Amino acid sequence: MYQLEEPKYFYALALLFVALVLFLWRIWWQKRVRQKFFSKRALDRLGPNHSGIKSWIKFSLWSLTVTALILALINPKLGTKIETVTRQGVDVVFAVDVSKSMLAEDVAPNRLEKSKQLVTQIINNLVGDRVGVIGYAGSAFPQVPITTDFSSAKLFLSQMNTDMVSSQGTAINEAINLSKTYFNDQEQTNRVLFIVSDGEDHQGNDQEMVREAVMAGIQVYTIGVGTPKGAPIPIKRNGVLQYYKRDQENNQVITKLNSENLGDIARWGEGRYIDGTQTKEVVTEVQGILNAMDKTEFESKQFTDFKDQFQWFLALALILLLIESFMLERKTSWLKKLNLFNERSEEA
């Protein structure tokens, strides 16, 4: 197990690409100037020991040095000790709607991103609980199994998008059915499912499926994301708007929050409907719901001791820098003996 203390410094690796472009431009410019003012014979006489390959070796050493320094800034940490930790909490599963209607921008930046923000903030405020994430549109799929690793859960949550499911629609009943496989601890008495959706286009017998979930000990809550007024569904490519979704009669589709459907599902599930407009209020309400529940003890193994590894990268950078500093851009005796380009000596 490892951790990255400062992953933001990965962006600094872009400097290597810039350096490569500048290096290639420098080689091209030098070659052009030499060809313009000197003949090949004159260049061979003026710089008989000039080595082109040495320039590439020095640049490679410099690039590796910079890479090692950046990795030192990122500071990878390796887990060195595993301990069994006893926790008290509730199993919480989030079913996130990833249908195309969640691209509507009646809430900023759009419904899907708002949903992910809500779930992320809820996870940030959990203590001792276990979380799982389900994605669904025309069908449901497991995104994150029940875990105590909140960082991984938030990472996989951030990667959810509307292209993850080819079949469209909002099969809430399939998400509810899948959630039952998440709660595999028979001793866990409090099991909670939060459905985060705009409530549109749901299919199937939701009431029957919700009641089956309740019989399995799962309380179902719903969080509505969107507005009753609604908005068109933008279809974008690389962040650029291409068109708005239209129906078979070429009319622009307006998707609206269906709080009534979500309210019914919550009522059948012995939970309640939560308006997802204000993130802070949603987090507070969810915290109140979970805090009112009895906590169950469970054990989990996790790394508790992480050792810094930046010093190894600093040492490597220092060694590479010393090698690069003592290397000259001219042929050495061993390189002449290699005769990489099959050059003839002047005596011949």
Image: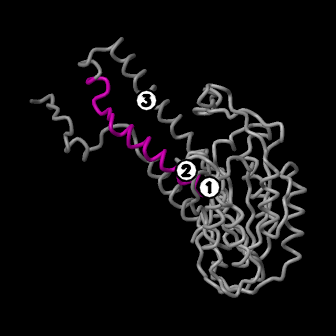
Q: Which tag, 2 or 1, sits closer to the chain's start? A: 1
Residue 53 visible to an observer of this rendering: yes
Position of residue 168 relative to residue 241, above or below, is below
What span is colored magenta in the figure? 44-72
| Image quadrant assignment for residue 6 | bottom right
**Residue 69 is covered by the magenta coloring:** yes
Quadrant including the C terminus = top left
Q: Is residue 197 left or right of residue 64?
A: right
Residue most extreme to the top: 36
Given contact means CB atoms under 8 Å apart, are the residues at marks 2 and 1 in contact?
A: yes
| Image quadrant assignment for residue 175 | bottom right
Q: Amino acid at mark 1?
A: Tyr
Residue 72, x across and y down, in percent? 60, 58
Q: Is residue 198 left or right of residue 345?
A: right
Residue corresponding to mark 2: 165
Residue 2, x across and y down, in percent? 58, 68
Q: Amino acid at mark 3?
A: Leu
**Magenta region, main secondary structure:** helix
Indicate which label's residue lies in the foreground, 3 or 1: 1
The colour scheme of the drawn protein is one colour
Nearest the eye: 31 or 92: 92
Position of residue 326 relative to residue 184, above or below, is above
Tell me how far mark 3 sits from mark 1, CA to CA. Answer: 48 Å
Q: Secondary structure at mark 2?
A: loop
- Residue under the image location 76 percent in, 64 percent down: 123
Q: Which tag, 3 or 1, sits closer to the chain's start? A: 3
Give the numbered dot on residue 136: 1
- Residue under the image location 82 percent in, 67 percent down: 271
**Residue 275 is covered by the magenta coloring:** no
Residue corresponding to mark 3: 24
Q: Which tag, 2 or 3, sits closer to the chain's start? A: 3
Q: How many marks?
A: 3
